[in-house]
Amino acid sequence: MVVAGRQKSIAFFIALGAGLIFVTVLLYIGWVLLNWRTGILLFFGVVLALLIIAGVVLNTIFLVREIRRNEQHDAFINAVTHELKTPLASIRLYLETLQSRAVEEEKRKEFYRVMLEDSDRLLGTIEQVLRTGRVGPGSRKISRSRVDLNAVITDCVQRARMLHGLNGEQLRYRPTSPCTISGDLDEVRAAVSNLIDNAVKYSNGNVNVRVDVSETHRGRISVRVRDEGAGIGQSDLKRIFKRFYRVSGPLATRVKGTGLGLYIVRSVAKRHGGRAWAESEGPGRGSTFVLELPIAS
Amino acid sequence: MRRVLVVEDEKHLAEGLRFNLEAEGYSVTVCETGEEALQRLTVDRQIFDVLVLDVMLPGQDGFSVMTDLRQAGQFIPTLILTARGHSDDVLRGFGAGADDYLVKPFDLSILIARIHGLLRRREWLLTEEERAPAPSQIKDEYSFDGTSVQFDLLELRSRGEVFRLTLMEANVLRYLIRHENEPVSRKTMLDEVWGLHEDTDTRPIDNFIMRLRRYIEADPQHPRHLLTVRGVGYRFVAHPKGT
């Protein structure tokens, strides 16, 4: 309902902009017909008319973008609400169950495990939101140290295997020769972890993820995370790195997320003087995410 | 036993709800998508007494599931259980046809009280006809054609012999007796006696019938009371014609 309302207001502002431009052009033609003999007035008239038209166009673009941003912001609030409240609801439910019912030892242990998993999930979401603030524009400088990228990736891969119950075949990584970058360990780990988690999440159950590290010719090192999952349409390849952006469609409702993960990846890459991008042959054909960071001198 | 259908894609929550509702004496079925719930409730016409519906589901969301259910004439009492607690969302839920709305995280006792409330309302509204006694409440002794069954003692006397019945045998027999002279399908029996709504194998029922025939029938190969209705199931006849 809210989204339909937004679509309407976007259409309204575009129509308003077009209408205003049309009126301006009409007035302008009238002006030219009246003043075509006086050169200087005509000149100012042209400039003024062009300025007005440019202003109206800019105004329309700005409004539409603002409405879109609001829309994404709402979607984000919904997603975060869900991601925060669901594990909390679950923990609470199990605690109340333990408090109010006689529960067998076996079940009790299972309940504790479930609650721990839920609190990890909760913590993950909170970390993600806080990190978004830390890596965004205008945040403090990174505290650089020498980071062994192989160790970081191995760490992330093992964590992901445990978390998602994967074996070494489903999530493959073979460490290469030692490579050290200069950066913030915590941020680099978060970025790599996000890429791996995404690859697993969007694999639709058919998990076959490969992580590769290679040195590129410009003194940079690139981490490639390849999956055979959902894939990405051409038009979304860039947009998915925007804050709050999530690809629309059934996939986004099935795979839960806040729309912050890739934004963090790109921000971390930028802060380290590197870059991040995605490659995909299209929906359903898998995708590769690349994080490129400069090697420590 | 009251049957609750829980539509929830978060496994932890779903299992927690199942545990608690079963502890309250409900039979609980969980499904993960709105599409599956619609299939069960409108196409398969499975019988449930209360629906607990999440909103943020993969695929079709809970609000549109609710709308579709009501449009299909499925008026099962429904509680929407969701993380979305904004007043717009609550209004949308009721607008779609929900009977109650509860926001996550929720208080377990409140959730149970609300489900009780929905059931109570439903029972108050049931007509006399619908309020037929449940199988367990039917008279506890039944005699027919030289056979007598004492359901409370799980005993069956026939042709001078006493047979001990298992609880399930007694329930099956009681159900058939209650529907005397009507053909009863295997699926309905699974549904009503066992409380199973899945596409479970119906062959175990045949085994129950075979055992019951051994107790009741003089000649189990040529039954006169527990008749097979081809392509459907079984029919109980207390007083066969020609006796």
Image: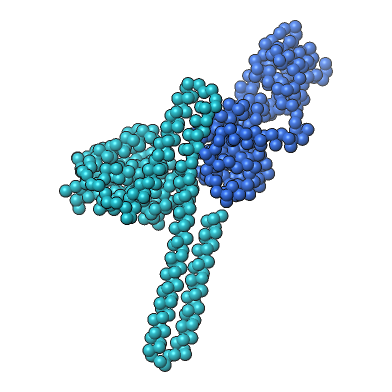
Of the chain colours in the picture, the one used for chain B is: blue
Q: Is residue A47 visible?
A: yes
Question: Which of the chains is cyan?
Answer: A
Q: Residue furthest bottom?
A: A37
Q: Work out whether residue A29 or residue A185 is closer to the camera in this orientation and state it.
A: A185
Q: Is A270 located above or below residue B177 in the figure?
A: below
Q: Provide residue B207's location: percent of width, then percent of height.
A: 63, 19
Q: Work out whether residue A64 or residue B229 is closer to the camera in this orientation and state it.
A: A64
Q: Quadrant of residue B206?
A: top right
Q: Is residue A280 visible?
A: no
Q: Residue at x 25, y 49 (%)?
A: A293
Q: Provide residue A230's location: percent of width, then percent of height.
A: 41, 46
Q: Is B49 located above or below residue A264 in the figure?
A: above
- Left of B197 or right of it: where is A287? left
Q: Residue at x 78, y 19 (%)?
A: B238
Q: Is A76 located above or below residue A100 in the figure?
A: below
Q: Provide residue B218's location: percent of width, then percent of height.
A: 74, 12
Number of labels in the image equals: 0
Q: Residue furthest left?
A: A297
- Left of A109 or right of it: where is B23? right
